[in-house]
Amino acid sequence: MRSLASQIEGEIRTGQHDRLLYSTDASLYQVEPLAVVIPASVADIVRTVQWCAEHDLPILPRGGGTSLAGQCTNRAVVIDVSAHCHRVLHIDSTQRAATAEAGITIDDLNDVLASTGLFFAPDPATSKHANLGGAIGNNAAGGRSVRYGRTSENLLAVNCVLADGTQLRFDEGAALRDPRIGEITERVAAVVLKHRDQIKARFPRTIRRNAGYGLDMILAQLERPWTTSPLENVNLAHLLCGSEGTLAVTLDATVKLHPKPVARGIGVVSFVTLEDAINAVKPILDAGRALGLTAIEMLDDVVLDAARGNLEYRQYVDLLPGANVQKREPKAVLYIEFFAWKDRQEIETAFDGLAAVLSGLDGVMPNGYSRHTDPAAMLKAWKLRKAGEPLLHGLPGERKPVTFVEDNAVPVENLSEFVREFKKIVGRHGTIAAYWAHASVGVLHIRPLINLHDSNDRAIMRAIAVEAADLAQRMGGVMSGEHGDGRVRGPLLERYFGPELMAAFREIKAIFDPQGLLNPGNIVAPGPIESITQSLRI
């Protein structure tokens, strides 16, 4: 690494302590990298990629390390863009767009945008730490994606470096302006059109989907009306979304911005059973689209029971609407958020509309609906929702909530049946699971309780992973709605997509990274199913 050190201004860390620090992300996995590069600038990133290509060394671009599927752990040269590459380069309030370097966090970007009255909409729970480059690599979404979509729906352009060190800017129409991008786009289009029937047959039509490469997005662009060439509508920046750093390294990105609301409100609804809460999602969603609905989030009784046993969070459970009425406790809660863009009265109208929907539903607890518009009250209302996972780690016993089937996405109309069948799966294997998260888009972050120190439980984990993926597919969904494939779901990709589309993914990978240097083993060439319980951080 000495020859690289003389060519960049940033740091190179090769000591075991530093490599251990970068051996983990927010997932179950631990893999010690070869070295860690902390670039001082975008130029350092480009030179590091070029140097790695010259020396045939694998590369792992990394931001905040908040990934839950293990895609930020690899035996590679880690390039940590978060330390210095976080400038906002340009804001265009008229066009509602901003350009920022890959290392800026989503929260910091929105802080800079605050004075413009605009914001970047994707809002993963880790937005305080999640970097823009990581949001692209993971196609991050968050609770408000039912209104604003994923990162791919909010991305205009990406300035990136390929594995061979070539720097390119992908945006709509770039294929007609830049010969190299034109050549890449032609090859990508050929792969997509060759596999058109399989893409249409096997890609899910859920609002949230984040498995494999986004060939469905490119196909949709190719099928749009065109003037000069079908390639004029293709934006390869969208193919980078969800690619987990396997196709290119993001340097900076231009993103779409949205007007901030003038007011916000949260309705909290308590239900007698989890099934009642899930059955309420679609009618609330159908009515809420015209009322400024931006999110429907859910907690189940496993999380609520954990909160009741926690000194800090017990008070928030007691404040839930309908709590302690007729000596009954809610078994599930929905948090329904509304935005107003004209005046505050829109929120009251939305609340009244929600009340009308609830009046026709079964399972709403007596006095089980509360309205919140005060910022402090809304903060308290959300606090319990955001505490879901930390609370579960406090459950007694050897089994803990494990992140491996936490990201299934199904059509909202199939959500109730999906949960019923999922409960049967975990029940057959002698365990239980907690259910919470983005009900409005059919994504529930389900955590089965597993003892990772027990070989029998690890076998149960593998079995549940396979059965859950099959269930999601039968329900018209997908095993990853936002958290990606990584180490934990990569081994299931061929089972889900079939050999033809896996071959298509390999063709796409070869177009961008023929040496296979970028985050190897992710999406293409994953390990066998046994690998999901290997390299565990236990």
Image (cartoon, helix red, strand yellow):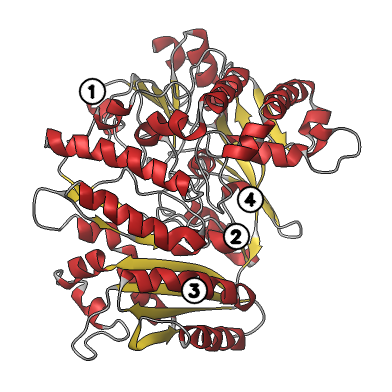
- When the figure is inspected, residue 64 is found, relative to residue 61, above or below; the finding is below
Q: Which residue is mark 1?
A: 16
Rendering coords of residue 341 (x, y %): 65, 76
Q: Real-space Cα distance between discs 3 and 4?
A: 21 Å
Separation (CA) of disc 2 from disc 3: 13 Å
Look at 30% across and 70% down and name the residue there.
384
Identity, as a three-letter code, of the amino acid under mark 3:
Glu
Could you say which disc has been placed on residue 337 in the image? 3
Estimate the spatial distance between the alpha carbons at disc 1 and disc 4, rounded to whole Å.
40 Å
Q: Secondary structure at mark 2?
A: helix
Mark 4 Cα-neighbour bin, 10 Å: few <14, some 14–19, many ≥20: some
Q: Amino acid at mark 1?
A: Gln
Amino acid, disc 2: Tyr
Tags 1 and 4 in contact by the CB under 8 Å rule? no
- Residue at the far right in the pictured view: 227
Q: Position of residue 427 (x, y in %)?
A: 22, 52
Per the model, the C-alpha gap separating discs 4 and 2 is 8 Å
Nearest the camera: 47 or 275? Answer: 275
